[in-house]
Image (spheres, rainbow, N blue to C red):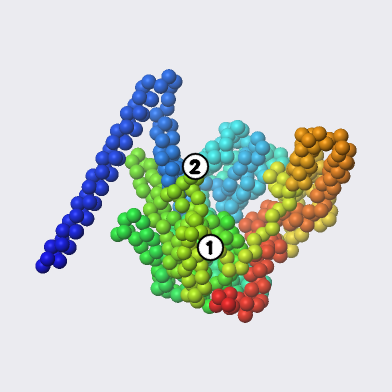
Amino acid sequence: MKRKRILILLLSVGLIGTAFKQVDDYFEVSKNLDIFSTVYKEVNLNYVDEVKPGELIREAIDAMLNSLDPYTNFYSEAQAEDYRFQVTGSYGGIGAIVKKHGEDLVIDKPYEGYPAQKAGLRTGDVLLKVDGKSVIGKTSSQLSDLLKGTAGTTVVLTINRPGIGEQEFSLQRAQVKVKNVPYYGMIDSETGYIKLTGFTPDAGLEVHTALTKLKETGATNVILDLRGNGGGLLHEAVNIVNVFVKKGQQIVSTKGKEKEKDRVYKTLNTPVDTDMPLVVLVNGGSASASEIVSGTIQDLDRGVIVGVQSFGKGLVQSTRMLSYNTQMKITTAKYYIPSGRCIQRLDYSHKKNGNAESIADSLKQTYYTINKRPVTDGEGVNPDVKVGLPDLSKISRSLLRNDLIFDYATQYRNTHDSIVEPKMFHFTESDYQEFKAFIQDKDYTYETDTEKALAELEKKAENEKYTSVIGESLEALKADFSAKKSADIDRHRQEIMELLETEVASRYYYDRAFVETTFDEDADIQEALKLFDEPARYRAILAGK
């Protein structure tokens, strides 16, 4: 009886403590809202210049949310459509990405099968007018807003096609759904490949369909490419893992402030294949839902992860509807994959100088896969086989940054009606000489590490009064290097040709070309093919040997 009274007393003290905390929290919120309201009123009434109340509040909201993490965001009524596209991958429009290109606005990518592509618009077309009104001087965001609209409505575009001239297109807007799987196909007679770029609704179904069709084609191995995939819907990540693992398997659990809202997610469907050798490709751009998929595949020893360390986002966001048709996305939980680890890399609750820092090594813990392989939390998903793509040369980066690869591909498309299949398409020596002529009068200046070192040497020589001693040698060295640098266009010929082949082929074959033209040069894909050719090594990796 005495123990029972003590227990009741302890519970009562706990409840009272909780109640006091709630009262304290409520008082703090109420007090600070009153302070904020008072400051806002004073600024609005007495500030020397005219202020815009709506903009002031938006600045305050954004600053408050920015102090938390990058994923907690507020969306005004005007931004609701953009947020809906992020979540669903669907919008009403012409089905094309536009971008700023110098002073112009151009078509960057028409989606295959949608109004822009069907009407004949091409990458590189310069937008002049929308429904007769000039778009010169507008931002790409403003133009995008003009192109979007209710499916079935008509929009008239006036464009300038480089090398051909001004043209007019009348398009009927449609409901555009960007594919989560823009490409799947066979690399060779045995290996299937699936490129997954999003986790919007039906992502799991698209992967299910892709793997089913690849197996019908003869695939006995498969590569799932998650590189550059920043994530999306958590339940779609579960559905995608379900394509490769049995029904009823726990995939991920979420834990947040409100314990009653903690969830456990298990696979609900019959898989396509639980035994086929699987390689998952990841890189630093693979985040969130991509890490649920790759991390779970690793924890369950279902496949081998290849590439470089993933981003490390172990946070879950939920949508909250607010007043006046506004809404917010707010971080409400962390997720944990089957081994028990959370892959969150940055600690947003403890910042230094406003920046989140990586979780300290001393705080990281070791967990284990089904086969007892050690894996670590707090650092994204580390691949089982580290490869990673080599860095581009300085000249290639300059050509890309200055849109010269893009511009030449535009010229090529407007002067060549067709090309062979992407896998068969290769630049000839004649093509490359044409490209060199094309860029001859273009600016693609760049500074090499060697030039930086020479400039630093020259500066130090001046400071230490050695210019008279090494001046002539330094000038000769600079001249000799300058001559050699001019040969970079030939020294890096193979790399530049590969970039040109991909960009040109994409003008005819869209997403398919971006993938198929790179199969032979992609180091991650080549490593995956080696693993499939060495089944003993593949099994040894999964066994932790």
Q: Nearer the viewer, residue 7 or 269?
A: 7
On the image, the x and y values in percent for residue 32 come to 32, 36
Between disc 1 and disc 2, the foreground one is: 2
* Quadrant assignment for the N terminus: bottom left
Across the whole image, how many numbered discs are drawn on residues? 2
On the image, the x and y values in percent for residue 370 come to 47, 75
Label 1 sits on what residue type? Answer: Val
Residue position marked by numbered label 1 in the rendering: 381
Label 2 sits on what residue type? Answer: Asn
Report the disc number at residue 353: 2
Identify whether 290 is placed above or below 41: below
Residue shown at 34% from the left, 26% from the top:
41
Describe the element under mark 2 as helix, strand or loop.
loop
- Ranked by sequence position, the earlier of labels 1 and 2 is 2
On the image, the x and y values in percent for residue 214 come to 58, 71
Identify whether 274 is placed above or below 455: below
